[in-house]
Each structure stands twice: as C-alpha cells, then as structure tokens.
Amino acid sequence: MNKSSIYITILYNSALPPNQIQEVCAGLEEEGVPFLLQKWDKAGSFIELGKEAASRSPLEVGIGIDQNEDLCVHHDKLKQEEPYLQDKLQNGRTLGKNAARLIKGLPLSL
Amino acid sequence: MKKILAGVDIGNSSTEVAIASVEGDHAEFLSQHLVKTTGIKGTIDNVKGIRRALQEAAKKAGIELKDIDLIRLNDAVPVIGDLAMDLISETIITESSMIGHNPDTPGGAGLGVGVTILINELFEVEEKDQDYIAVIPKSFDYEWVAQRLNQAESKGISITGAIVQKDDGVLIHNRLNKKIPIVDEVALIEKVPLLKLAAVEVALPGHVIRTLSNPYGLSTVFQLDPDQTIQIALVAKALVGNRSAVVIRTPQGEVVERKIEAGRIILIGTNNQQLEVSINDGAEAIMNTYEKLEMLDTLADVRGETGTNVGGMFNGLRHDLAELTGQLSNEITISDFLAVDAVIPTSISGAMAGELSMESGVALASMVKTDKVPVQRVASLLEKEIGIAVEVGGVEAEMAICGALTTPGTRKPIVILDMGGGSTDAAMMNKAGKITSSHLAGAGDMVTMLINSELALGDKELAEKIKKYPLGKVLSLFHMQLEDGTMLFSETPFPPYTFGKVVIREEQDLTPLSSKVSMEKIREIRRSAKRRVFVTNALRALKRVIPTGNLKHLSFVAMVGGSALDFEIPQMLTEELGKYGIVAGFANIRGTEGPRNAVATGLVLSSVRIGHEVLK
C-alpha cells in the first residue's frame, strides 16, 4: 500500500498563520500517524471543517480548525453536529495526539 | 382464620422483608422488599430501615401497614468482621538508580551508555572522548533540543541517548542526524543525578528491553564485580517486561530487598493451647497453624506480636470494634480469621517515574465475638413506633435453612452457605431437623479489598464495581471486546473517556479504568480474589458443620446471601464442590426469589411450622 495515501486530514482556515497549527501536527507526529495539511478558503465553523476533513481522510478521522482558534476531531461515521472531541487551539498538541490515538485504538488523554 | 405475617431479616448490609398471608398451616407469600440496613446490625438504628422496607412491601402486596398482624424479627447478633492487609517484603532502591517505565512513544531503539548531562550544558563539556546521555527537562522545546543535539554531534561530542521529561521522544528522534534511543515522559527528571554513568535502552515496538533487564547485561555495562552484580540483580528484575528503561549508577547507590519484620500471630485456644506463626511464612502456613490448633483445642483469641506490623493490625481492629460496640478493647476476642496471600503494589523508593513494584503480603479478615446486643430493644422500639406486635424469631441459621428448603429440588439433609459482605456462614440440617452452624470471617468485602489493593486502585467503590460487573474493552468508536473475546457493536459511538480503555460494564453505564493493566489481567485478579476468599471459606465452613468432617458425606448445598447473587462466585463453588459429588448451586427461595430473602421467608414459615411444601 502506498504510505502517503494513509493519513489524517487537517483542514484549517487560511486566515490562520501556519505556525499556529504546528502543535497539532507535533501531537500527530509524536504518535507516528501521518497527516495532510489543507487550507480552507471559504467560511465555515470548526465543526463543518472537521466533518469535511474526516470525509476527505482515508482513515476517516479529520481535524478542523477555524479562525476563532476552535478545533475538533471528527469521524466520517459520526453525525456532523456531533464531533468526537472539541478544544481550543492552545491545546492543539493534545488534540493532535488524541486524533492519532483514535486511529491507534489507544486511550485518549483528556 | 387468616393472618398477615411479616418476616424481617436484618443483615450486615441489607434488611429484607417478606409478607405472607397465613391460614392454618398454609402460607401464601404476598410480597418482599429489600433496603439498605440503617445503622449497625442489631442496634435500634435499624428501625428506620425496617419501617421503610415494611411500608414498601405492604404497598407491593396491596395492603396497609396496619393490616399486618405480626412481625417476626431475626435474632440479629452483630458479627463484626474487619479487614487488614500488610506487606511482608519490600524492595528499596536508595540513591535513585533506575527508571523503568513504559511511555507509549519512546524515541529510537537500541542501547546508549554515557555520563548524564543537562542539554543546555552540553557545549561546556571538557572531555571530548567521553560518551554522554542528554537530560532534557520540560522547559526545552523539541525543535531547539534536536538542533542542539545535531550541533553537538557535528562538534564531535558523542551523545548516545537521551532522557526527556515531556512526551517528545519521537519528535526529537525524527529530527536527529544521528539516531539515539530516547526515553520520554520521565516525570521526576529533576531527580536524575547528573555527571553519573547511565544506560538508556529502548526496544523496537512490540519488543521488550534485553540488556538492562538482564543482571549480566547490567554488570557488563557498568563493569561490576560479582558482589555488585548480586546487588543490582533486583534492578534487572524490576525492569523485566519494559519497552524502555534507564539505569543510573551512583557510587553510593544501594539496592536491597528488605524483609519487613511483619511479626507473629499468636493463636490462643480455650484450654490455653498456644501456637505461633510468622506472617512472613504466608497465608498457607498461617491457616495450617490455625487448623492444627483446631485439632487440639478451640480458638479463643488471636493476638499479634507487640511492636510489629501484625500487632498494630490486630490492635487497630480491637480499638475500632470497641468503639463500635461500646465495650473495652480487652474484652473483645477474635473468634475466627482468614488469611490469604495478596500482591501489594508498592511504590519503589528512589524511582523516578512513579514505578510500582509488586510485593507480597498477607490480607487478614477477622471476626469478633461481642456480647449479644439485645435485639429485643429493636423489637420493642419497632412495636412502639408502628403499633404492631413484634416477636424475635429463632436463630438466623435455622431460619435461613427453613427458607432455603423452599428451593425446588432440595430436601433434608441440607447445608446452606450464607455468603454475605463480612462473613461466610454455613449451617447444616440433618434428617431429624437438627441444625449445626458456623460463622467464618471473610466474604465479599475481603474480595473488594484484594481487588482494590492488587490493582492499586485506592478506590473502594471502584473495586466494588470491578467485583460486581464483567469487563469490556472499547476497541473503536463503535465496537467493544467482551471478556470472552466476542465483540459488541454499538449504534452510538462510545464516549471519548472510554475510548481504548478497559471498562466496567454496569447495566447502564460504562466506567473506564485508568490503569494500563489489560482486561485479561484484571479479570484474572478479580476471579482469583473471589476464589481465594470464597472457595477457601466454603470448604472451611462445610468441614465444620458436617459431623464427619468429610465433604463426600454431603449431598445438597444451597448458597444464599448477597454474594450468591454474584455473576461468577456460585459457578466457582458449583465447580469446586462438584469434585466431592455435592449438588451445589445458589438457592431459589420459593422458586422465585433467587438467593435472596431466605431468612425473612424462613421467619414466616417457621411460625406456621411447615416445610417446603409451600405455594407461592
């Protein structure tokens, strides 16, 4: 299987500076789960972005981050209005880590 | 003439009521109810609970409380048990010399040996030909750390491993030019001694470390002589099974396995026979000594050697019970006890990541004889408060047998095993209707204590839940593995706090367990605790009530009481007693009530003097 085709999608509002989302990526990297960063130019809440990210992700798990620095972990099989985890961007490391652990089937750190 | 009778059974933890309409020698049961016992069994505080139970039962029967003609109370003698647990050995590692823990994501793989040095002092090192282990507290960012390590590498400073406080092991490792093993999530990194020889080992995912968990691996790394190797062997033992570890050798460091002087138990017989046994000898030796005394004499009291752990254990027990009963503590004697081996997780002194070592110990449940607390006072108060005649019925064991005989498929001679919270009681009724009984220490509460200790929970309520319900492990958002390996699917996602965790499956809720212990291990501990207490006690109790002392002479054993409701204890006993050809199972009182309500039912039936030919 092509390694690059397995990843968690991160959709973030293009108004956010990229270095702000670095912590989310660090959380994923520490757990060893690949990810794909994508900018989102249109309007949309972190929940809509999360759901869209999940639907684009081959692992069915996605992360959405909006310009209010809210972010969520979403799963393709969940209803849009019920993201699995929500948090603020300052806790991005933990949220990224938990998204990865969701793939690995390990307990989350809450 | 029709009369309405109520049987009331006050137990250690619950109060049960049965209401029946009695005409001649025929009793028709109308309803039953169970409430939590208020106050200590046999004291006037019980009245509150009794009234509530009666009211509820009357409501269920469709009658008024005042329609009841007679209330029969059990002769509730408080049997007070208490539990104590203590260590008999302890590993002490002084001068902090090891970290053996399993962070989920250590970095790299392999073994690194070198001298510990703080990351920010790396460039100040003098000896260039020395190998170093970098110590990285949480104030340092992973990007900076990686850059620093790469720089040091290019300057020719040899770094062979790293110890990191934050969960950054993989992040640092990914940015290094020269890969080294990294142990992360070391909470108490400030305790790591600096400028000391240390070894860092990380195994590949799914593997365990091989060098630091091998005494000769340690002796090779640290160039130890045979005497020092003997000393450090305990460190190796503590690291077996880990994926990563750090061992730091401090010259004054010392590792010892200390045998705590747990003390001796002194068993005193009624004819002044006296036997002693050391707690260090373990539960089996203690129970054998007890058996030996029983062959010569009857147990009158148990004492612990003064100034030792066990002495403190028994003194504390006496003191608590004295307060409870209002007696002097030297008037309190121990009439029975049960000792079982226990594993007690103990934090290792000198460990740096909160490691525990499993030490052996002994748990004790003891039963205390107290003066009969006049249950008559309870009866009078109840009579006064509700205006219904109250009488105190027969001995509890007789009533329980009388009730148990309403189980379909039983007949005299029969033995009942009443398994409650504090005590396991057995009573035997022979063909002629003569009853012998025995009260033994140790039951459900002791199981809870063992689970609580062996899983290092520090939470009695959680331990109680583990005892009562089966486990599951949440594997994904929508499915859970059950204890027997089968899968359970859920239409709604399992909540995040349960994800990836072992959970207790209560009827409605899932309670997650925070420990990393596997479901299989928890199940094993739960089942072994139940076996150690209930199988041991069932055999002990049965041997005491059978005239011949030979279990093969028994045919029917009916289990009653709260612990007979447990989802696996009755099966364990059915299996164990089946070896002796005994038909053993939990009772089904009146064919409908299961193992509950035996005494309350017996209280009603004994007043009409009929056997088990009862219609519901």
Image (spheres, coloured by chain):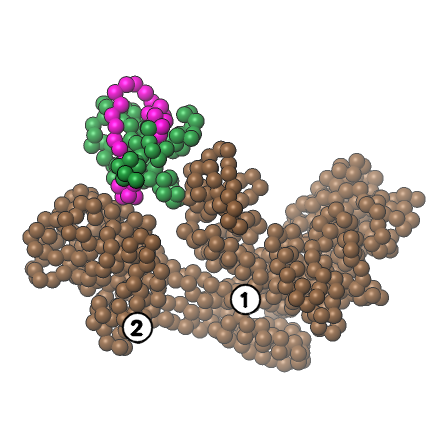
Picture quadrant where residue B3 is located? top right
Find chain B in the image and tell me its colour: brown
Image quadrant containing the C terminus of chain B: top right
Please indicate, yes or no, whether residue A28 appears anywhere in the rendered image: no
Going 43% across and 48% down the picture, which residue do you hit? B514
Say which colour chain A has.
Answer: green
Residue A35 colored in magenta in the image? yes
Circle 2: element type: helix
The circle on residue B582 is none
Residue under pointer 2: B231
| Residue B137 picture location, percent across and down | 22, 50
Q: Between residues B576 and A70, which one lies in front from this camera angle?
A: B576
Above/below status of B489 relative to B439: above
First in sequence: mark 1 vs mark 2:
2
At x 72% / y 54%, what residue is drawn? Answer: B587
Extent of the magenta region = A27-55
- Near mark 2 (Cα within 10 A), the count class, few <14, some 14-19 or many ≥20, is some
Q: Which mark is residue B340?
A: 1
Residue B18 vertical position relative to residue B531 in the rendered view, above or below:
above
Q: Hey, what amino acid is under mark 1?
A: Val
**Viewer-proximal residue among B601 and A20:** A20
